[in-house]
């Protein structure tokens, strides 16, 4: 690898973060581990990290091209993403174009109900407290962000949703909902971090309505890795597929 992978800084449920020679850069490694239900259901799926790194890199690039600041610098090789170092904000910001998942378990929405404009929800990222939903006042009182930063986070999230929804539709995928995480860079700019992959989004095939995301794993269905591969094949162009050996 051209980039030197340094000390392990952080290890999460599906990714590791390593130091590099540059203190402002890190390498995010996408692992094959997969979890659901706050880590109760666990497995290791060969190649998942490979596909998720390719899909995330592609979607970060699409967002960068639309003028959105992201952590993404480049994919050094599959699974290894060179990224700007961020101080992560412990918020899970969720955007929803259609009602699915926990929203249906908690509220009387109809399955597939469309939200125009999309719903934005924020959960406090904390295993100890079980990722509870919170509002602006609670996020500010916890000292996570100030009022202006939370306004910006929502504004950027809507722009991310518009950009991704349009791009994915062109590729034959419905963006049902997704979770993103932001961090502060060294100048306290709000920057998109983490990942955008079938682990963190609901993707439905426009033609067949097939699920192409982690819901297959959550429900114990087969074809998880085949679905992730299909998303990568649908999103990457030929040059990218050749470069990373995706077939
Ligand atoms: N999500 C995620 N991590 C979480 C919770 C949710 O990436 O810890 C994603 C999930 O994949 C979906 C969206 O956020 O695309 C909304 O998830 P939901 O609240 O419906 O919860 P779930 O059904 O995943 O428990």
Image: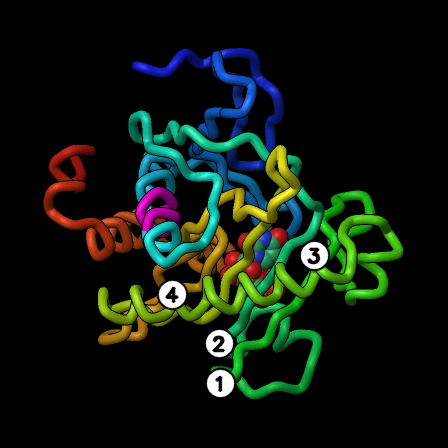
Mark 2 residue CB less than 8 A from any atom of ligand 1: no
Q: Residues within 10 Å of mark 3 (few under 14, many from 20)?
A: some
- Give SS at disc 2: strand
Q: Give the main secondary structure, helix, strand or loop, of the magenta stretch.
A: helix
Mark 1 neighbour density, 10 Å: few (under 14) some (14–19) many (20 or more): some
Quadrant of the rendering where the N terminus is positioned: top left
Task: Please tell me which residue is depicted at 36% across the width and 30% down the height of the picture.
Answer: 79
Residue 15 tag number: none
Q: Nearer the viewer, mark 3 or mark 2?
A: 3
Q: Nearer the viewer, mark 4 or mark 1?
A: 4
Judging depth in this view, the residue of 206 and 166 nearest the camera is 166
Q: Which residue is mark 4?
A: 163
* Relative image position of residue 176 (x, y in whole percent): 44, 71
Determine whether the beta carbon of the residue marked 3 sits less than 8 angstroms from the nearest atom of ligand 1: no
- Point out the tag, 4 or 1, that comes first from the N-terminus: 1
Q: Residue 62 versus residue 112: which sits nearer the camera?
A: 62
Q: Which residues are magenta?
A: 56-61
- Quadrant containing the C terminus in the rendered view: top left
Disc number lying in front (2 or 4): 4
Image quarter where ligand 1 lies: bottom right
Residue wearing tag 2? 97
Residue in the foreground of this view, choosing between 56 and 43: 56
Horizontally, residue 21 falls left or right of residue 228, namely right
Residue indicated by mark 1: 114
Residue 42: % across, % down? 55, 40
233 relative to 138, above or below: above
Q: How many angstroms separate mark 4 from mark 1 (CA)?
A: 18 Å
Q: Of circles 3 and 4, which is in front?
A: 3
Judging by the rendered image, the residue that carries numbered circle 3 is 149
List x then y, in percent, for residue 61.
33, 47
Whether residues under marks 2 and 4 lie with C-beta atoms below 8 angstroms apart, the answer is no
Whole-angstrom CA distance, mark 2 to mark 4, is 13 Å
């Amino acid at each position: 690898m051209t980039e030197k992978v340094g000390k392990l800084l952080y290890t999460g449920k599906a990714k590791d973060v390593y130091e590099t020679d540059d203190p402002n850069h890190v390498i995010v490694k996408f692992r094959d581990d997969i979890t659901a239900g706050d880590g109760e259901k666990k497995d290791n799926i060969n190649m998942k990290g490979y596909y998720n790194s390719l899909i995330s890199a592609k979607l970060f690039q699409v967002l960068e091209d639309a003028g959105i600041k992201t952590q993404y610098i480049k994919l050094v090789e599959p699974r290894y993403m060179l990224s700007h170092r961020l101080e992560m904000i412990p918020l899970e910001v969720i955007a929803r174009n259609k009602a699915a998942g926990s929203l249906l378990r908690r509220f009387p929405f109809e399955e597939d109900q469309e939200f125009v404009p999309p719903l934005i929800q924020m959960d406090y990222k904390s295993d100890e407290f079980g990722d509870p939903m919170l509002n602006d006042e609670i996020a500010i009182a916890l000292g996570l962000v100030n009022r202006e930063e939370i306004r910006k986070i929502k504004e950027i999230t809507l722009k991310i949703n518009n950009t991704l929804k349009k791009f994915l539709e062109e590729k034959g995928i419905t963006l049902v909902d997704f979770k993103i995480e932001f961090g502060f860079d060294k100048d306290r700019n709000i920057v998109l971090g983490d990942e955008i992959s079938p682990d963190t989004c609901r993707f439905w095939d426009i033609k067949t309505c097939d699920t192409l995301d982690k819901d297959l794993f959550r429900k114990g269905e087969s074809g998880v890795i085949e679905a992730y591969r299909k998303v990568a094949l649908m999103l990457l162009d030929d040059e990218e597929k050749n470069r990373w050996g995706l077939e």
